[in-house]
Amino acid sequence: MMPGDNDAQERAEIDASCRGPVLLFFASAVFWLLAGTLFGLVSSLKLHNPYFLLKLPFTDIYLGALNFGRVRPAHLNAVAYGWASVVGLGVCIWLMARLCRVRLRYPGVVCAAGVLWNVGVLSGIISILLGHGTSVEWMEFPSYVTFILFVSYAMISVWAVDMFVHRKPGHVYVSQWYLMAALFWFPWLYGTANILINITPVQGAVEGIVNWWFGHNALGLWFTPIGIASAYYFIPKVIGRPVHSYYLSAFGFWSLALFYSWNGGHHLIGGPIPAWVITASVVASIMMIIPVVVTAINHHMTLRGHFEMLKYSPTLRFVVFGAMSYTLASLQGSSMAIRSVNKITHFTHYTIGHSHLGLYAFYTMIMFGAMYYIVPRLTGSEWRSSVLIKIHFWACAYGIITMVVVLSIGGLIQGFMLNDPKIPFYPNIINATKPYLIGRSVSGIMLTVGHLAFAYHFLLMLVGMGRDSGGPTLFNQPQEENS
Amino acid sequence: MNRLTTLFLGFFVTFLFAWLGLVIIPLISFGQLEPQVNPDTGESYPVVRSGLAERGKQVYQASGCIYCHSQQVRPASGGSDIERGWGPRRTVARDYMYDKPPLLGTSRTGPDLSNIGHRQPSAKWHHQHLYAPQSISPDSIMAPYRYLYETRRIQGAPSPDALELPAPYAPAPGYEVVPTEEAKALVAYLQSLDHTYALPEAPLPKE
Amino acid sequence: MWIYYTAIVGSIILMGGSALYAIYWAAKGGQFANMENGARVIFDAGEPVGKVTDLFPGLDLEKERARKEAKKKRKI
């Protein structure tokens, strides 16, 4: 018996307990990633080619479901509630099990919840395409869908929290703070927003604030903590080196908790709400520089001297790309909250570039990295092809960089022109931004290629066509008593 | 306190702080606004929309117009919205008191529509623009909302609602394009978008 | 109306104050004393500090590094 065998056995049993739910969540998430990518690509093409896919192919039937005004929110909701939330929940369950060193209890319930979540998202997307979307950004699903998602969420989060309550004694790791926080905050956010906007709607200006308090916090208090929790686990775990400064982790966490939730009003600068709300949000947005820089320093110092590993580990590549994008996206966001900058960037494609820098370059890339680490440990086999992994990485890396660059440049041009009243909206501003919209479609094609490569590779793993590792294994099967 | 309680309290308090500040205080301080009533004429602002226009707002929502059009005029210090002719003054909270939800928008792929009813009151223009934006603005990237219109055979006399369309967009001879009830409602809504009245907190600039 | 404002602003001040007290209490009670040990919690005897736990499939890290060293030596 080797000294690490008991630990390996324990790890393997914990992984095995999560296998069903986490793989189900990952499979659903990848499906919604593909659906969301398709909606996104179609939306992007329609924006510079308005007659693209206006009719059912080979017919003369114009369908509302094919219009930009419906495909675009279908994209947002598919990627936010279908891909991002589901892969996040999968990663959260696995990380929580590993860090608490306990098995997931009642995985069947969590699986059922996963199916229910998918039913909710599917109904929601269909509702949007049929014209029953609410047209409240980030909350386009009709109320009955949010009710379904709530029930599903309760069924999942209760077992995640249960693992934490029954955790093995010892220190609570930074990732666990972020995950517990996210699990606690999300229902409060989603519940408040749904009640005040969809169920018992309040007056317009207040709905506007609640909408963007929710929208921003969905990113800042739900997705961001899951992404950062993953980065804090996978970076040290892959390279075999503890986080550089645990003090900084604690400080970064509490300053994020304190400041992030006040940011929402920065989406409404210049809008019909009192100046004090906007000012509070602008101040909080600038204060966010503190936790962001602290986290960046921590990750950088942990990686220092080990950057070579980016060549050798898929997980590290994706997670570090994501972590660096987090810093960039957040600093960009803080700058966009400054009124003089906002005067130019508000309402432009620059904002769309920023949101993709956050939700894709940061969050999605980290989730890809997490999946590359977790899936082999659940299926018991290695990823089959380095080539597919590299196609995935480079197509997505170049794709998202292209998207952010073209939308930022196009958005700034749009913003400067919008602020010059002598420049007519039509045709000048339209024609000036069109080339950048075409550039975005090109980047969308790159991302589609990357996603297809990943989805195919993941499917191979699911059907048992992964590679059996001949060399040093990086994961273990639960073994019989006598090895 | 054990770890879970400490953590939980921390999450709770930090979140509560912003929830009170961004949700509850706004709800209390400007969540029960009253309209401005002119004591002489009895007119009340903002104007309550007609049933057709209110139905049209739902069509606007079902059609996803907010994803390209905003409905908020920024103050002169915040952008050139007023100079551009999108409104004589900035829009304020009371302008949206009846809008549940307010269709503020976050994107100006197309122009701001807060005062489109004042800027472009012609229903005919709106119908043609919705059916075929490129027939009015050839370089426009706006999606044609063809599904809100019906192309049908002319029965007897042409319908008074029929759209007059230039060459490549006109239907085949013997056919006419008429708006559905939804299209009529949508245009009624667009015509109702007018915040050019003065409010004490948002006076009109002196001529 | 004013009673709502007083209550809310009052509770915000109370919360800020208790947050500061909580940090003081935590520091006094030694919560921040042995923090660096917390960073090691993710390692165990089987996956100790220093062990790489993710590689491209089929990659032999030692061989790769040796190959790169040899390449560098040939260039010099």
Image (spheres, coloured by chain):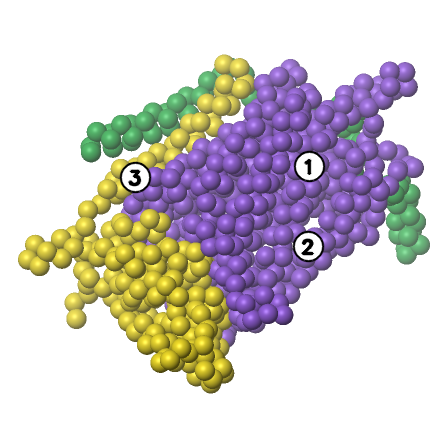
Chain colours: A purple, B yellow, C green
- Residue A396, which numbered label? 2
Q: Amino acid at mark 2?
A: Cys
Give x and y (percent) for residue B198. Answer: 18, 60
- Point out the frontmost of discs 2 and 3: 3
Q: Which image quarter: residue B149? A: bottom left
Give x and y (percent) for residue A435. Answer: 57, 72
Distance (Cα) linking label 2 and label 3: 42 Å
**Circles 2 and 1 on the same chain:** yes
Along the line of sight, the residue nearer the viewer: A4 or A236: A4
Mark 2 or mark 1: whose residue is earlier in sequence = 1
Name the residue beneath numbered marker 1: A24
For image coordinates 37% across by 28% down, the residue present is: C16
Give x and y (percent) for residue A281. Answer: 39, 44
Name the residue beneath numbered marker 3: B27
Give x and y (percent) for residue B167. Answer: 47, 85
Q: Write down the chain letter for disc 1.
A: A
Along the line of sight, the residue nearer the viewer: B205 or A332: B205
Along the line of sight, the residue nearer the viewer: B50 or A1: B50
Q: Amino acid at mark 3?
A: Leu
Few, some or many residues within 10 Å of mark 1 (<14, 14–19, 20+): many
Few, some or many residues within 10 Å of mark 3 (<14, 14–19, 20+): many
Is residue B57 at least partly visible in the picture? yes
Q: Amino acid at mark 1?
A: Leu
Q: Write down the chain letter for disc 3.
A: B
For image coordinates 58% across by 40% down, the residue present is: A119
